Image: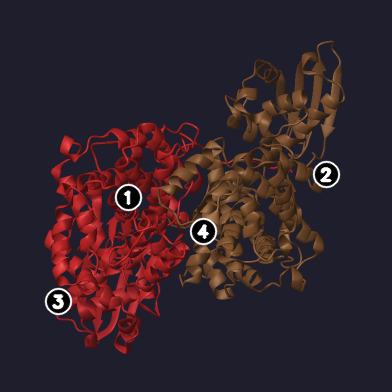
Chain colours: A red, B brown
């Protein structure tokens, strides 16, 4: 069977597997001057936001199903399922906490790549730290370095890799989780490269799964695979030392674009966790400017009863990702910019409660969604939205949101993050424990262990 | 950030996720006339060959490392690690048996796709059957239907998917393992579709890993992921009902070619396990014709001492996959057609022993490898080889192998498979148990359980 086996391949890629392994294994931690206090504070914000999301979704049916499947393996009680009473083995804890942290679509976003970086990385490294008795400082150091790996690989491949169909959170997250766990295990550069190499064979997630439980499975599966890759490497398991960059390595296999400088430039000086952001709204990030705009209309006194139509102009990606016109339940509504607009105008907010099945199917919400007329305008950035409310009396009220609340230019404050945490956590573990848990998250970088922290997350 | 988000996509794919789910959930088993006795016998050959490979590599350092990593999870003793004393949880057993079954590169090959189908599927379904107490008949039925899924998906995507860099055994194997486990768990069509959908987000393996322990990790990781996908689906976990075929689903994300008819044509009438083959030589299938040719030269009386040079003409793929001119150890030698020729001429065989580090580094082998002059001739099929021994006295002895021993046209007999099994198993569990184990493998389709079988595989 003769055939053309030629595929365009870059045979001159720099040795990024080794470069990243060296960085992860040898870069000084925060206390040794590895990065600024601002970066370290952002790492704490990332950790706290992730933790609250995981606790908040602990009783979701996706968590029930995942835990039931894991329990079929009769797991040893090594690490906590956040927001629930029991423990499971650390790899399964990484899986389930990764699932819950992304179930509400309320977690963090590295805006350059639309990666949700904490899900895979924090889920893996917290489970490992809990079981091994690592300190909170080691946890945060690993988180910073792990997220740097997944986001830099994401930068190199974005947007082609995402456009092709990969859910970039899971496909790069395995690498970030492996890097963080290798750091926590104090693997040397050689074994860290092996951990990255084993992880490189396990990208997780396709975009077709958006709107199903398998979307949050992606960061969970990536967390689990990354953690196991580090454990395997710690025991001498081998992989290609150029597993990321080789012509038949991970990056060239899953992306037609690979800008290697995104991995190597300013490595150790610029940390991608600095560019992390946190969602004020419990849905896909591309809907946020539209929700913000509609909430601003409400703040200006526009009421749903006045609406004849809502003219929404957005980038094509917004409708490609979140164009569900008639969502049937809460999960589908998270992929509906139409529902986002209706919630923003009706409630002035769009947290998890505004994505309940009940709210989504309320007659006034259905009616208001149907009044949203969305048109594509690719001159508008995908992080912006142009909204005009056309009122029944003929008036037109216009709002343009360049940078939505929660963006890098307009970030949530620490107090807003705490309020978001409480809004999710209070119902699961109670308000008293939630207050303590928030404080413990802020203080994790000075904690001698993380078991105190995870114990607070039990109902 | 305006950009072109258009990727060529097929929006008119048939609903193959549903079609395959229906087939797996509802096709009658062998006893109800689902397939012929010939197909069922081939399934037993597939199972036995896989089992022997897994037992044979049980003490390999890759198995040691993988088991050490799994033991860090303190697994429950649910299912056997073949060829070793202990048990681990069933998902970890699937992982490790999948690794060992492919460690020697001695397992089965679906020649149309170069998929090694049993590794992911049999490893998953045996571990699940052992823990759940399923019968041997249910095991074989699941194996037939699971392998049909992975190989049909492979047929649809081959060769573009493989050429892009995917190790097709692991990337399609997750689906086959999920299908087989869904069948064994008696999931209905709906849940079987969910199992396939969850698995679709977890393709495993890049070709860059060839020559490292991560190559055999691919079928192991696929087995584990497929088994977990079925467990998750059994507990109500959801995925896209068109996870395979949608524009951002698995197949279009990982392959530029998708011939959907390869999935749907003659479904339930033609079974891909019929086209499975078994290796007489412990290395990549594309080297086999060259080894066979050199063994034939030896049978004709040509000795290594007589050789001035060996002129080898093969398809370009042979050198692309196995062009290592100077392998440094046994694992590298499995990707060296040069070593294959030297072994064939020197020993007349190339089982695991001929790929030991000691043999590979022997001075006479190094010298003989250097006398092999390989040239590409794409008019020669990749399943053939044209070899001419140029002797020191000037004589030329020519052998052309169209179909190597072990090919579909020239298959190994049942007796040869038994001898291959013993050659791997005797050293691990002893000759007496090996005899019983071979008989138990042939009889598995009538066994009321599989625990008797797995117990025989303990040293």
Q: Is residue A442 left or right of residue B300?
A: left
- Structural crowding at the residue carrying mark 2, measured as other residues with C-alpha within 10 Å and reported as few (<14), some (14–19) or many (≥20): few
Residue that carries the numbered disc 4 in the rendered image:
B78
Residue that carries the numbered disc 1 in the rendered image:
A128
Indicate the chain on which mark 2 is placed.
B
Marks 2, 1: nearer the viewer: 1
Looking at the picture, tell me which residue is in the foreground, B305 or A424.
B305
| Horizontal and vertical percent position of residue A205 | 45, 57
Tag 2 near tag 4, CB within 8 Å: no
Residue that carries the numbered disc 2 in the rendered image:
B410
Tag 3 near tag 1, CB within 8 Å: no
| Horizontal and vertical percent position of residue B436 | 72, 50
Looking at the picture, tell me which residue is in the foreground, A238 or B270.
A238
Marks 3, 4: nearer the viewer: 4
Looking at the picture, tell me which residue is in the foreground, B168 or B253.
B168
In this rendering, is residue B237 above or below B120?
below
Looking at the picture, tell me which residue is in the foreground, B235 or B203.
B235
Disc 2 and disc 1 on one polypeptide chain: no
């Amino acid at each position: 069977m003769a055939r053309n086996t030629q595929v365009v391949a870059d045979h001159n890629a720099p040795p990024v597997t080794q470069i990243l392994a060296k960085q992860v294994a040898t870069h000084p931690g925060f206390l040794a001057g590895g990065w600024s206090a601002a970066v370290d504070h952002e790492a704490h914000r990332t950790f706290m936001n992730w933790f609250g999301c995981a606790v908040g979704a602990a009783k979701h049916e996706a968590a029930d199903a995942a835990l039931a499947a894991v329990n079929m393996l009769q797991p040893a009680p090594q690490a906590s399922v956040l927001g629930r009473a029991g423990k499971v083995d650390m790899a399964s804890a990484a899986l389930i906490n990764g699932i819950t942290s992304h179930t509400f679509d309320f977690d963090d976003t590295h805006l350059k790549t639309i990666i949700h970086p904490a899900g895979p990385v924090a889920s893996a490294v917290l489970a490992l730290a809990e079981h091994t008795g690592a300190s909170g400082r080691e946890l945060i150091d690993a988180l910073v370095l792990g997220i740097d790996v997944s986001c830099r690989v994401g930068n190199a491949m974005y947007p082609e890799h995402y456009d092709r169909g990969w859910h970039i959170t899971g496909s790069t997250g395995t690498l970030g989780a492996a890097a963080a766990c290798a750091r926590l295990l104090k693997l040397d550069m050689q074994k860290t490269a092996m951990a990255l190499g084993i992880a490189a064979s396990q990208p997780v997630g396709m975009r077709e799964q958006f709107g199903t439980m398998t979307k949050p499975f992606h960061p969970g599966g990536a967390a689990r695979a990354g953690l196991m890759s580090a454990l395997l490497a710690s025991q001498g398991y081998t992989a290609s030392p150029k597993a990321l960059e080789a012509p038949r390595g991970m990056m060239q296999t899953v992306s037609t674009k690979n800008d290697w400088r995104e991995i190597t430039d300013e490595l150790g000086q610029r940390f991608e966790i600095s560019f992390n952001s946190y969602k004020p709204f419990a849905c896909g990030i591309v809907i946020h400017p539209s929700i913000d705009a509609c909430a601003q209309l409400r703040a200006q006194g526009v009421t749903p009863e006045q609406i004849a139509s809502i003219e929404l102009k957005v980038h094509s990606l917004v409708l490609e990702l979140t164009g569900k016109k008639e969502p049937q339940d809460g999960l589908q509504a998270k992929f509906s910019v139409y529902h986002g607009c209706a919630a923003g105008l009706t409630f002035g907010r769009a947290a998890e409660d505004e994505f309940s099945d009940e709210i989504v199917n309320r007659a006034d919400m259905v009616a208001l969604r149907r009044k949203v007329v969305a048109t594509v305008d690719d001159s508008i950035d995908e992080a912006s939205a142009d909204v005009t409310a056309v009122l029944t009396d003929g008036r037109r009220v216009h709002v343009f949101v360049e940078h939505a609340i929660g963006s890098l230019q307009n970030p949530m404050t620490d107090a807003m993050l705490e309020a978001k945490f409480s809004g999710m956590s209070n119902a699961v573990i109670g308000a008293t424990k939630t207050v303590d848990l928030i404080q413990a998250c802020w203080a994790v970088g000075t904690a001698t262990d993380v078991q105190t922290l995870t114990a607070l997350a039990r109902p």
